[in-house]
Amino acid sequence: MRLNKLGAAAAALVLAGSLAACGDAGTEAGDSPEVDVAENAAEEFEEGTRMRELAEAGEITIGVKYDQPGLGFKDASSDIPTGFDVEIAKILAADLGIAPEDVVWEETISDNREPYLQQGRVDLVLATYSITDERRQVVGQAGPYFLTGQQVLVPADSDVESIEDLEGEEVCSVSGSTSLSNVEAAGAIGVPADTYSQCAEDVVNGTVGAMSTDGAILLGLAAQYDGELKVVGEEFSEERIGVGYSQEYPEMCEWINETLTEAFEDGSWEAAFEATLGGEDVETPEPPALDECQA
């Protein structure tokens, strides 16, 4: 734990309704908010904690998505991914005294998030990682730092208006995601894919009639295809996006929550949202309430 512990409190307000638009999803790393990299960070943590080890090493490996504009995205010409998840990851790394350029960014898809944490391949996962009881059986999850809901992405000329219109129809989502389970629970036929970008491409080329996942992800994908796709329907789930860590280091939960609380209170969380998912027609939500860490 941190030697100077903060009080763990955050506003308990829920993001109402779906995001109306995705901000500058392709934001260049140079346009990202500045992060305040802590000096002498190791001294702030107790001996033997994972945070102390990472701070002393000056390096951390963080798993993020590479194919979700606005949340976690990386093109071939960039060294550092962009997106809201990435900005939150930078805030956590900075609290350990680690600058964004010193983070090892590891591409993480939905199906390998738990294995990567269990194997020690990554130290943290911030990859639109919905908090669930099932996942907490095998890995640690702190947060949430963002609330969103599942919607549907269809061709721009489609008559589909909601998930109800897709009962018995094929709908693409990513293997290992809660989105795929939700699609099937709604009566559609889930078609698994490795990545969200593959799903979007399959919708564009007509392989499947629709895809479904968090609305914020869909808005970013729709923006990439410039009028070929649209997001439809009310949210039919609530996704509580959190930070994954290994159960070998339970002390990380309190540190993550303390750092998120600081970000909620000092405006850095808001700046991260507005730089990635915000826009003229998007109201910045209040930060969500954090779950208490389990003893």
Image: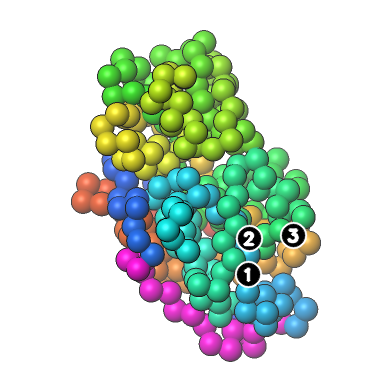
> Which quadrant would the N terminus be assigned to in this image?
bottom right
> What's under tag 2, amino acid-wise?
Leu
Part of the protein shown in magenta = 30-46
Residue closest to the eye, 23 or 257: 23
Three-letter amino acid code at the position of disc 3: Gly
Residue 108 highlighted magenta (yes or no): no
User: Percent x, y for residue 282?
Assistant: 27, 48
- Per the image, the residue denoted by label 2 is 124
Distance from disc 1 to disc 3, alpha carbons, whole Å, reads 11 Å
Residue most extreme to the top: 168
Residue 161 in picture, x, y percent from top left: 34, 20
The answer to whether one can see residue 114 in this image is yes
Secondary structure at badge 1 equals: strand
In this view of the protein, can residue 1 be seen by the observer?
Answer: no
Tag 2 near tag 3, CB within 8 Å: no
Q: Residue at x 52, y 10 (%)?
A: 168
**Of the residues shown, which amino acid type is indicated by label 1?**
Ile
Whether residue 3 sits left or right of residue 285 in the image: it is right
Q: Are marks 1 and 2 in contact (CB under 8 Å)?
A: yes
Q: Is residue 42 above or below residue 208?
A: below
Q: Residue at the front extreme? A: 77
Q: Residues within 10 Å of mark 1 (few under 14, many from 20)?
A: many
**What residue is pinned by disc 1?**
60
In the displayed structure image, the side of residue 238 where residue 159 appears, left or right: left
Give the residue pinned by disc 3. Answer: 120
